Structure formats: structure tokens, C-alpha cells
Amino acid sequence: MTEHFNQLTPAEAERLALLSEECGEVIHIIGKILRHGLDSYHPKSGDINRILLEAELGDLTHAVARMCDAGDINPDTIEVFAEAKALRVGEYLHHQPDAVSNGSQKCIATDCLEGTCPTCTKLSPQPDTEGAE
């Protein structure tokens, strides 16, 4: 069998296809909610948009978990980036409370245990070294 140019195994490609499909379905229901509202429902099926979103997010969560279980991606790294996003997104949000539910002030990325990565230096208060002896 000839190796594909992207060097993905068929199993890796399948998991990425699943992830992509689920992301698209989440985007699709978000579009419906933006047009019609969270509690609007499909006139024929009666499906409520909020529940459809929850279902699609569950499917997306499964696709991410499947990739983590297979070793394609690292859940700890995902958590680091999620915490970093929680800390930096606030200044761009206009209608959200200031409180962050699970953010931390310390970057714990495996390549950044010393607080020297760009993400860490933007997010964590750095010690004042001026005047230190």
C-alpha cells in the first residue's frame, strides 16, 4: 500500500474526519440558534435548538475523547490551552461576567514549566525583578 502524502494512517484520517464532521454540525446548529433562538424548535420534528446544541457538543466531545484515547492529541495540553484562552479572551467579550470558571494563573505546558513561553508571559503575572539583588 502506498503511503499517503500526509502520512496519516487510515485510523487517524478517520478520527480527523469524525472531528471535522462534528465541528461542522456544531457550527450548523449555532447558525440556527443565531437566526431563531436557543429555545426555538424545528416546526416538523419539534426538536429544540438548545437540546440539539447539547447533543452536537456531546458528539464533538466524544470525537475529541476518541482522539485523546488514540494518542493523537494530549488532553493535558488541551486543558492548558483552554485555561490560557479563559484568561485572555475576557478583554474581547462584551456581555460576559468577568469571573472565569476554571482558569488558572500558571501555564503548565510541558515545554513551559519555567514560565518563559509567550502564552505564559502574557497570562501570568511575572515577578518584579527590578531592584532585586
Image (spheres, rainbow, N blue to C red):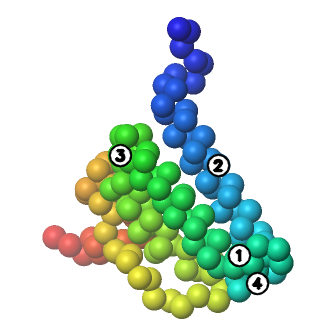
Q: How many labels does the image show?
A: 4
Residue hosting label 4: 40
Label 4 neighbourhood size at 10 Å, few (<14), some (14-19), many (20+)? Answer: some
List the residue tagged with mark 1: 47
Point out the tag, 2 or 4, that comes first from the N-terminus.
2
Q: In which quarter of the image is residue 28?
A: bottom right
Distance in Å between CA atoms under marks 4 and 1: 8 Å
Q: Is the Cβ of the residue at disc 4 closer than 8 Å to that at disc 1?
A: no
Quadrant of the image occupied by residue 126: bottom left
Foreground tag (2 vs 1): 1
Is residue 27 placed above or below 33 in the rendered structure? above
Asked if the residue at tag 1 contacts the one at tag 2, i.e. Cβ–Cβ closer than 8 Å, the answer is: no
Is 55 or 78 nearer to us in this picture? 55
* Secondary structure category for the residue under label 2: helix
Q: What residue type is labelled 4?
A: Ser
What residue is rendered at 51% in x and 40% in y?
A: 15
Pointer 2 residue: 21
Cα separation between marks 1 and 3 = 32 Å
Sequence-first disc among 4 and 1? 4
